[in-house]
Image (cartoon, helix red, strand yellow):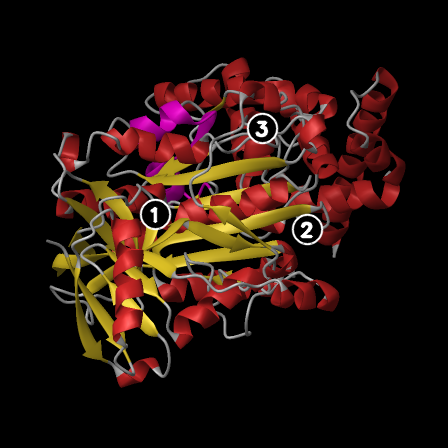
Amino acid sequence: MKHATLYCVTPPSEAQLARMKAFLAREEGDPEIEIKVEVELSLVSGFILRTESKIYDWSMYGRVEQLRGALGVVHGRRPKKTVANLKKCIEEFKLAAGEKEYGTVSFVGDGIAVVTGLDHACYGEIVTFSCGVKGMVMDIRRDEIGVILFGRDTEIFEGSQVTRTCRMAGMPVGDGFIGRIVDALGNPVDGQGEVISSDFRPLENPAPGIMDRQPVTTSLETGILAIDSMFPIGRGQRELIIGDRQTGKTSIALDTILNQKGKNTVCIYVAIGQKASTIAKMVTTLREAGAMEYTVIVSSTASEPAPLQYIAPYSGTALAEYFMYSGRDVLIVYDDLSKHAVAYRAISLLLERSPGREAYPGDVFYLHSRLLERASRLSDELGGGSITALPIIETQNGDVSAYIPTNVISITDGQIYLESELFFEGQRPAVNVGLSVSRVGGAAQASVMKQASGTVRIDLAQYREMEVFTQFSSELDDSTKRQLAHGRALMELLKQPLGHSLSMPEQVVLLQAANRRLFENLSVKELAAEKYDFLKFMKVNFPDLFTEIGNGEKLRKSQLERLDEAGAKWLAQREQESGDGKRT
């Protein structure tokens, strides 16, 4: 015989009790249900009928929740209905016995709760604990489920009640998020009030199919000469930024965000396990540069529980998909997925899943592949929007063959490898030419940039090899000296301070000048300042050339001759100024 408990303000009459038994017999399929009556004054009015696995809520609070759901006031969204529609909705509203399935906590700790009784819960479903904390179903076993908590577990105890919501985990989205800082659940953390959302998207969403995509052919300019010339990034591409700690990985992502100003691109920066002070410093930089006008920051700091760090990149991607499917271009940065994998490993071990290599669970590859596959460039039929992903991975002592780095390298369309030795030598950004690659290649590069950067990568590789070979040699022939001088000039050209982005015409002009051996006779110290003087000289004296280069088309022979002429004039002017300085 099954048992049920009736919580009410006033005990029911015999006729009311008989109707309740008939209702339970119909719903539960058992005519022999015994009902125990308990008076609960906190209900104010109405009653709650509770069986072994379900709750039928007919209380005042349950009716209010039903009305809120009918009006569309859910998930923190405001109803998008007009006054006439709201009146009609209220007139047609009918109360029903609010049925909820509930379970009981059997274990809680370390951001994990084990729940029994929720026999119909789905993977990824949101459940609500009696204290108000929400969680997500992450593990389904024969007699119990594992739930990750999206809040503190200090008010959850063994025996606490857990209720199904029948909703999958999701994120409120909308244009109101632009310029804001939110947590992994979409709640604002910048103290600027409520974020107005217009829609709700699931955290887990299938990636666009092959027929829904189009080739990556449009360049997303980073403003960094070393990357735009040799490892171009296209809209819809996934380019990994990988390197040891403190080698400038975040700086590359930050420069790329700053360079999107005025280019109709929404930027989303997902901070996973970062210090709050680091995020605050980045926000200050973005605000001073006016970049927060088109940027959203999804923050999950190191002090937050592992479940929030786990869902943060999925929340950011759900927000990015909202903009992509509305026909806009999005740049999303995951900083960094190493900490994301660590958070997932902690959750998996607490859920008693079998550990594999480096104690990571067996599905850690799927963890990042289902995230990064959502980056794409949609077909014109779907609006032509795109998500360009820049995941960041931290290596240990340059070991790119570790488990997580090799996983993400195999998922992405190329990687920018930052080398510690180059960084300590003063090469910023410290891009290793040999290990870095863009698998999209020149397909996403303007013709004029492809023309200018033709042999740069080969020249740099030859310079690095020759530099090692000749450091023990005292006598060098003229051709070797020229090649070493050209390589040093290229290395110096590629040095770029943080926040000093170069436009595509500026990059092309510098590369063409280097290819014409314009900077060979300058010392390294001279070239650091002279390259910017050369750009100023070109903008003042040859502005039409900059306009022509900005079209992106391949330079004609006449234009190359004018570039040679401009370089000769600049060298002559520089020699004259240096001669005047000596006479003075």
Q: How many marks?
A: 3
Label 3 crowd (10 A; few <14 / some 14-19 / many >=20): many
Quick check: 47 above or below 139? below
Q: Looking at the rendering, in which quadrant would you find the C terminus?
A: bottom right
Residue kind at label 3, given as amino acid type: Pro
The disc, 2 or 3, on the residue closer to the chain's N-terminal end is: 3
**Which one is in front, 370 or 473?**
370
- Distance, label 2 to label 1, CA atoms, is 38 Å
Q: Does the magenta portion include 571?
A: no
Residue beneath label 2, please? 261
Q: Is residue 411 magenta?
A: yes
Q: Secondary structure at mark 1?
A: strand
Q: Is residue 537 visible?
A: yes
Left or right of 179 on screen, residue 102: left
Image: 543 above or below 581: above
Q: Amino acid at mark 1?
A: Glu
Residue type at numbered disc 2: Lys
Query: Would you place residue 316 above or below residue 181 in this image?
Result: above
Looking at the rendered structure, the secondary structure element under dot 2 is loop
- Residue 95: mark in rendering: none
| Residue 253 seen | no
Residue 122: horizontal and vertical position, in percent?
31, 42
Residue tagged 1: 125
Mark earlier in primary sequence (2, 1): 1
The residue at the point 79 percent across, 34 percent down is: 550
Element class at badge 3: loop
Q: Residue furthest front?
A: 15
Location of residue 58 by image quarter: bottom left
Q: CA distance from mark 3 to mark 1?
A: 40 Å
Q: Which residues are magenta?
A: 405-427
Of the residues tagged 3 and 1, which is closer to the observer?
1
